[in-house]
């Protein structure tokens, strides 16, 4: 039993060293995506829409969104019918971006071309009906899915064209152990092995 006590003490020290070394704080990161001539053709999830996948990294949490877009609604369609769904790859968590709905004086009830820019913090989002935290995690695969779609399929072919679109996503990633912590942990486990071997030899020589 005397040989077990040093081993347990070293294991505790290794765990304590890892905890004291700590994990890096969740990192605040941004990723910018620039697109051009992207069509919104029809209803959400129907064939023919453009889908863009943005890799933010596993379990990343989407917090903010900024945009600078030029959008054209073709004749027979309205600017406020074009939108982008932001979701995880499985579409469990979903937010919808309609650039013209609040920005246009008439609510976007017309065809033509317009430019929109702005930003939003999903953690403090005021929808008009309620205010709350609408930020979400993208999942283990790290994919943020963007689908360009239409509320109403009013014309044959593309209802709207996103002539240019620059999207900037603000997100955090899960905290990870710092490299120094790994080193301290490995050193501690090495000491465990050394004490265990020495303990075994002491038993043999007893």
Image: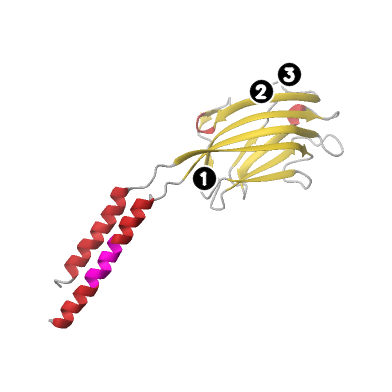
Alpha carbon of mark 3 to alpha carbon of mark 2: how far?
Answer: 9 Å
The span picked out in magenta is 188-196
Alpha carbon of mark 1 to alpha carbon of mark 2: how far?
Answer: 29 Å
| Mark found first going from the N terminus, 1 or 2 | 1
Give the x, y percent position of residue 8. Answer: 22, 64
Left or right of 130 on screen, residue 38 = right
Q: Write the residue at 45% across / 41% down.
A: 27
Residue 106: assigned label: 3
Say which of 130 and 70 sits in front: 70
Residue identified by numbered label 2: 102
Task: Report the label total.
Answer: 3
The relative height of residue 39 versus residue 187 in the rendered view (above or below) is above
Q: Secondary structure at mark 1?
A: loop
Instruction: Determine which quarter of the picture holds residue 84.
Output: top right
Q: Secondary structure at mark 3?
A: loop
Q: Is residue 192 magenta?
A: yes
The relative height of residue 193 versus residue 163 in the rendered view (above or below) is below
Q: Are marks 1 and 2 in contact (CB under 8 Å)?
A: no
* Quadrant (top left/top right/bottom left/bottom right) for the C terminus: bottom left
Instruction: Determine which quarter of the picture holds residue 79.
Output: top right
Q: Secondary structure at mark 2?
A: loop
Give neighbour class at mark 2: few <14, some 14-19, many 20+ (Cα, 10 Å). few
Q: Write the residue at 71% across / 17% down.
A: 105
Residue 60: assigned label: 1
The relative height of residue 70 versus residue 11 in the rendered view (above or below) is above
């Amino acid at each position: 039993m005397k040989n077990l006590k040093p081993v347990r003490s070293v294991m505790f020290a290794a765990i304590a060293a890892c905890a004291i070394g700590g994990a890096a704080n969740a990192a605040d990161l941004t990723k910018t995506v620039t697109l051009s001539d992207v069509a919104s053709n029809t209803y959400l999830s129907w064939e023919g829409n453009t889908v863009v996948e943005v890799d933010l990294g596993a379990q990343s949490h989407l917090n903010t969104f900024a945009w600078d877009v030029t959008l054209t609604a073709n004749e027979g369609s309205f600017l406020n019918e074009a939108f982008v769904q932001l979701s995880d790859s499985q579409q469990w968590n979903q937010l919808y971006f309609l650039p013209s709905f609040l920005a246009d004086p008439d609510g976007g009830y017309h065809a033509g071309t317009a430019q929109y820019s702005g930003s939003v913090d999903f953690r403090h989002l005021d929808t008009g009906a309620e205010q709350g935290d609408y930020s979400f995690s993208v999942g283990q695969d790290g994919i943020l899915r963007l689908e360009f779609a239409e509320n109403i399929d009013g014309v044959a072919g593309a209802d709207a064209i996103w002539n240019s679109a620059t999207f900037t996503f603000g997100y955090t990633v899960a905290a990870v152990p710092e490299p120094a912590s790994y080193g301290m942990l490995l050193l501690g486990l090495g000491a465990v092995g050394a004490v265990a071997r020495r303990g075994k030899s002491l038993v043999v020589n007893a």
